[in-house]
Amino acid sequence: MTPNHSAPTDPVLLRKAIAEDAAPLTEVFLASRARSMPYLPKVHSDEDTLAWMTHVVLPETEVWVAEAVSGEVLGFASLDGTELEHLYLRPDVRRRGIGSLLLAKAREISPAELTLHVFQRNTEARAFYERHRFAAVDFNDGSRNEEKEPDVMYRWVAQG
């Protein structure tokens, strides 16, 4: 069976995050990074990551949650103006169109342009963004992120 990259196979709801989402969003963040980027150094404890999600991400960015009809959190996107700060999915729900739904919501919020950073070695994420018409505009040696991992900045601009 070929993975569906355009639409989720099961109903997925998008909603704005609330403070009570901090723990499940942290779980998604940690699980996704562990599975997709095992080469990253762990620079913060799980408890510190939860505190960051609670006190920085949720109150300071616009966060949208993808959830199953059952209420189970599947992923999230976080925007700060025109920057897509985070887009993470649970590893077991990848390739079902959920990331595309979250990205479409980000484009709805910032319809003219979006920028984001991806680790250079995260080839699956890079391919995802390139399929969605993002262009690499800047490569960095890792000096701008706390993991010290080389990254690339991507930019999408609305056509028209």
Image: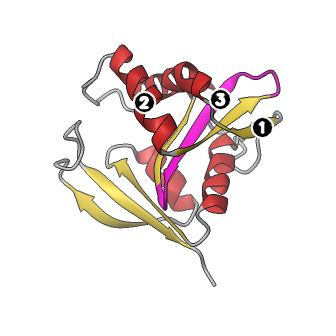
Highlighted range, magenta:
69-83
Query: Quick one: quadrant of the C terminus?
Result: bottom right
Prevailing secondary structure of the magenta residues: strand
Residue displayed at 24% across by 25% down: 43
Question: From the viewer's perspective, is 24 left or right of 125?
Answer: right
- Name which of mark 2 and mark 1 comes first in the sequence: 1
Q: Is residue 70 magenta?
A: yes
**Residue 44 screen position, x and y as percent:** 28, 22
Q: Which residue is mark 3?
A: 74
Residue that extends furthest to the bottom in the rendered view of this protein = 160
- Residue 13: mark: 1
Can residue 59 be seen? yes
Q: Which residue is mark 2?
A: 55
- Amino acid bearing label 3: Leu
- Name which of mark 3 and mark 2 comes first in the sequence: 2
- Amino acid bearing label 2: His
